[in-house]
Image: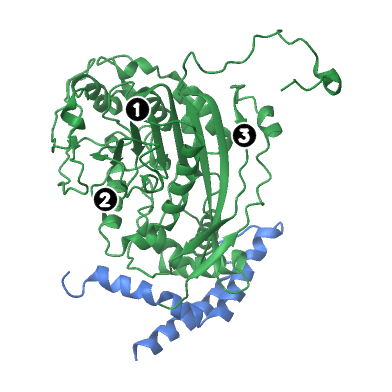
Amino acid sequence: MSGSNVRTRSREKLRAFPELFAQCSAEATVYGKCVAATTTGRQELKKDMCAKEFEALKTCFTNAAKKRVK
Amino acid sequence: MFYNERIRSSSMFSKERIRSSSMFSEERIRSSSMFYNERMRSSSMFYNERIGSSSMFYNERIGSSSMFSDERIRSSSMFYNERIGSSSMFSDERIGSSSMFSDERIRSSSMFSDEPVQRSQDGGRPHGGETAMISRRLLRLLPAACPAPSPGSGSRRTSGSSRGSMNVFDREMKRRQRRWAGSLQDTHLFDYLRDEVGGRVADRVYDVARTFPLALDLGGGKSHIAEHLSKEVVERLFLTDVSEKTLRRRTDIPTHCVLADEEFLPFPENTFDLVVSSLSLHWINDLPAALRQIHQVLKPDGVFIGAMVGGETLYELRCSLQLAETEREGGFSPHVSPYTAVTDLGNLLGQAGFNMLTVDIDDVQVHYPGLTEVMTDLQGMGESNCAWNRKSLLHRDSMLAAAAIYKEMYGNEDGSVPATFDILYMIGWKPHESQAKPAKRGSATSSFRNLSEIKPPSP
């Protein structure tokens, strides 16, 4: 295999995913609860229904990734 | 890596839905000899934790069980007939096998000797009205010393070229996925499910008190069934797979490895005493036809014992991805397909001509650290999605969302997430005069009403 290419880089990223994801378990729970709530009631899941919660999760995830690089 | 190995025993007692009474209420199941026994076993699955490389994300197959319904119109005579003429919509999928039967007679010692036999054959020939050469088929009969390297140059026209209703999966893609998975350095780490199910299929082979002179393992890969079998039960074995990388002999049974597509069996009629298959039938485009071919290569009174995933396999993954994509992107694409339902399986086997059917379902739950591990392992098993209408990427936002939803909705208290595999086992016999038949209608001498008064038969 030759050096770094898009495939190896994306694999690297995916390998880091569980670790980064674990650092944001609080945000993930909030988001997960938000989505799961739509599956029980009469309310139907729509796009961006939990956008705020997801934004928090993503911010946390991105920050964790940045920290890891440094 | 980050996690420990998990060994869990999963309880099998959740599935109450398969009850014989409910089965018989289904009109579709006509075969009266069929009975369902629900085997409940506890299984301990070893989950070998491993975070492998993965850039392809995992999709599961889509398919619809409705594809089985219009299958009935096809007559089995099409296997023999070269001219297909009228029903040309099916024709180009059939050509491969028909010519195999005529030319490739496995008859003499040439195949059963241990000498390397290699044949390539051009099976294409014109048929009814269409002038084009339809199918080139390259069959390699590998010598007994597996694995033998074989270039993937089989320029067989795959079923993918015509996108009919019966063409859900990209078989060429599946072959590439299996080859990729087989060439991984630590490919054995992903074998836990196949080994487990292979052992259970082997159990069912042992249940038949018989010695099988010649057996066929369809899609057997690394001998996941055969390694649990002994020479006393199976005297000679043909092992087939679509990918040469996964063909591996791990048993002391004399084995011939054949690179063959499950959809086009390169064997003559009435060849095998036993056909087994484990976890490969769920990728077949045309399951009814494949079962008919299995029926065909069996000798009369031969038995087919198979296992495939079905039912509600991977429903956690399916739901998480659907919810995540709905919430993030406003719509979802199929990542995990609907599988064959256990209620359809008896009908399918009956349609293929099998007799004395047994169908049962096992519920295997594997616990993973998270969503990415589920997908990585499925990929390592060569079980990535190969449906034609799969989406070519999973958005990173959707993936993050799906991981959160999976964990929240299905996660265990210790942070792991379960993945369910519903394994459907099927046993069917090719009819033979010696087999028990239902008594003639009206031949009963006493009524069920008087059941309590009937004396037990004297021993």
- Residue B128 found in image quarter: top left
Comparing marks 1 and 3, which lies closer to the viewer?
Answer: 1
Residue B384 seen in this snapshot? yes
Q: Chain of mark 3?
A: B
Marks 2/3: CA–CA distance: 36 Å
Question: Label 2: chain?
Answer: B
Percent coordinates x, y for residue B192 in the rendering: 43, 58
Amino acid carrying label 3: it is: Tyr
Is disc 2 in contact with disc 3, using a CB cutoff of under 8 Å? no
Judged by depth in the image, the label closer to the viewer, 1 or 2, is 1
Alpha-carbon neighbours of circle 1 within 10 Å: few (<14), some, or many (≥20)? many
Q: Which mark is residue B36?
A: 3
Q: Which percent across, then down, holds residue B57?
A: 37, 61
- Contact between marks 1 and 3 (CB within 8 A): the answer is no
For mark 3, does the 10 Å Cα neighbourhood hold few (<14), some (14 to 19), or many (20 or more) residues?
A: many
Query: Is residue A48 in view from this perspective?
Result: no
Measured as percent of width and height from the top left, residue B154 is found at 17, 40
Write down the residue under mark 2: B176
Chain B, hue in figure: green
* Residue at x-position 67% and y-position 42%: B17
- The answer to whether B164 is drawn above or below residue B375 in the figure is above
Q: Which chain is blue?
A: A
Residue at image point 15% right, 28% down: B110
Q: Indicate the quadrant containing the N terminus of chain B: top left, top right, bottom left or bottom right.
A: bottom left
Q: Are marks 2 and 3 on the same chain?
A: yes
Q: Which mark is residue B133?
A: none
* Residue linked to disc 1: B272
